[in-house]
Each structure stands twice: as structure tokens, then as C-alpha cells.
Amino acid sequence: MKYITLSLALLLTTISVAQGRFDNVEITVKEVSDHIYMLQGAGGNIGISTGVDGVFMIDDQFAPLSDKITAAIKTISPQPVKFLVNTHFHGDHSGGNANFEAAGAMIVAHDNVRKRLSENENTANAGLPVITFSEDATFYQNGDDVFLTHVHNAHTDGDALVYFAQSNVLHTGDTFFNGRFPFIDINRGGSIEGDIAAAKKGLMLVNNDTKIIPGHGALATKADYQKYHDMLVTVYTEVKKAAQNNVSLKEVTTMESITSSFFTDAETAKDFISGPKFRNTVYKSILQELETNEN
């Protein structure tokens, strides 16, 4: 009985700590256009379109934040969320799915997002996308033609860009980290080549007046997006050259010179993706690419 009591106490403490992680998170609202907003809190940036057709939402962060996010949305629109697009399946972008589904939202995502979420015992029974697409989809909401397009094997295997044509606003999901090194989930279909291709595709959609909502980081411009693309290309080129010259993974991971012109290892030491971690990921992605090409 003593051990059961201790185990229960430990479980309750763990739950309390997990909930407490979000207690002090504040959801900020930034106006992007006359009816499009960017919400920031903990996790990926949220996009919101408001208007006569209802609230069109992109991503929803973590489940414990749903009430705070809903309250923030009510400051810009009295209407409920009608459509919720997941740019990919990671929990900091889709964790609130079940909560918003319960409130009436219809969830939309790439085919692979539904597949990934349905394979996870924590997300298999609620909050799955009910509308999926394999390549492209278009919504007509709040005066915008909203273009969803799949970018292959970029951050994951289920990423989508979301472009509001008339408003000239692009949400990139995590295929664009503004002002930091990106997380490329090579264990779930992501690749450095695909991330470069995603940025290239996104740059084709935008112009100098486009407002860009990145997956993480501040609201961006085309110049910011171009800088990110160029960083990916430079790092990819240098790491691939090293790999082809038989420089080991361990050596490349320590070669700060590959990335220091963008961010130093000291600057990124406390980031989710540090310089060494980014170089390590790029190397592993390139090895996968070279093995695929050989086969």
C-alpha cells in the first residue's frame, strides 16, 4: 500500500508539473492584415483569419493552452473556429486539436498528418483531421482564396504552406524558422533537401509586400525568408562536401565554421536546435540522401 501511495503521489506530481509548465504562458495577438492575425504563446505560431465566414485557424499549440488561445481569439472575433489547418503533426502545432474539435472546428491537414496522429495512442481517438489532401487544396474564406500546398519531406513528411492570396499572407509552418536554426525531423520524413525545396516553393508564392508567418520566430518578410533559404543551401553544400570527402559525423558536428556566419554556437547554445545539433542533423540527412541515390 505504501508503494502504491508513493506511485500515485509521483503521478499526480508529474501531471501537476506538466500543467504548470503553461501556467504563465501569455497568448499575444499581432495584426498581420486587416483580418489576419498571428498568435504567439508556447509552441508554433498560430494564424487566424476572421470575417463573415467565421474563424479560419492555422495550428493550435499545446492542449493546456486551448482556453487561453480561445480567449485571445475572442478579442478579435466573436465567432467560433470553423476550420483548423494543421501545417504538420508535431504536438506544439496540433496538440489542441481535440479541444477545438470538441468546440466545433473541422480539422484539415495533409494525408500524412492524419496518419501520424492516428498512429499515436495519445492522439488516435480525438482531434484527427477529417479533411485531408495529398498535394493541394483551396478554401474560400473571408474574402481570400486560401491555397494549401504540400511540400515534400521538408520539416516532416506532412508539411503544408498556407497562402492567403488576396491578403498576401503566407504561413509556412515549421518549414521556416525565422532567426534561428531549424528542426528537421529526419526520423519522420524530413530532410535538408526537402526543406530547401519548401523554402524555394514558398519564395515563389511571395513578393516584397508579403507578410510571412513562420513556424517559429517573429513575423517575417521576403528578405528574411530568402536569408533562411540561402542559409540552408550554404550549410547543405558545405556539409555535403565534407561527407563526400569522408569527414566523419563527429567531426562535422564540431565544425562551427560551417554555420558561424549565420549564428555562432554560443548564440544557439540554449536554443532547441543548437549549431552542433543542426550540423549533425544535416549530415545525417545527407547520408540518407546519398544512400537513396546509390540505390
Image (cartoon, grey):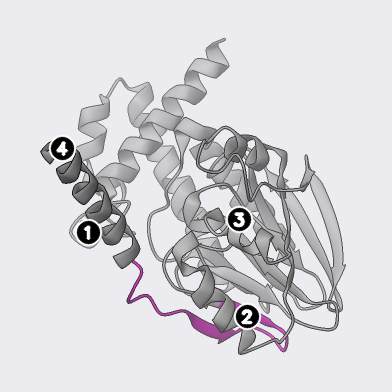
- Between disc 3 and disc 1, the foreground one is 3
Give the mark nearest the N terminus, 3 or 2: 2
Give the mark nearest the N terminus, 1 or 4: 4
Say what amino acid the circle numbered 4 marks. Answer: Met
Secondary structure state at the residue bearing disc 2: strand
Q: CA distance from mark 1 to mark 4?
A: 42 Å
Residue labelled with disc 1: 270
User: Around disc 1, counting alpha carbons within 10 Å, would you say few (fewer than 14), some (14 to 19), or many (20 or more)?
Assistant: few
Q: CA distance from mark 3 to mark 2?
A: 22 Å
Residue located 65% across and 35% down the image: 115
Say what amino acid the circle numbered 3 marks. Answer: Ala
Residue labelled with disc 3: 98
- Between disc 4 and disc 2, the foreground one is 4
Q: In terms of depth relative to the viewer, which is nearer, 60 or 146? A: 60
Residue located 57% across and 10% down the image: 295
Q: Are marks 3 and 1 in contact (CB under 8 Å)?
A: no
Say what amino acid the circle numbered 2 marks. Answer: Tyr
Q: CA distance from mark 3 to mark 1?
A: 31 Å
Give the mark nearest the N terminus, 4 or 2: 4
**Residues drawn in magenta:** 21-38
Residue 24 belongs to the span the image colors magenta: yes
**What number is the disc on residue 170?**
none
Q: How many marks?
A: 4
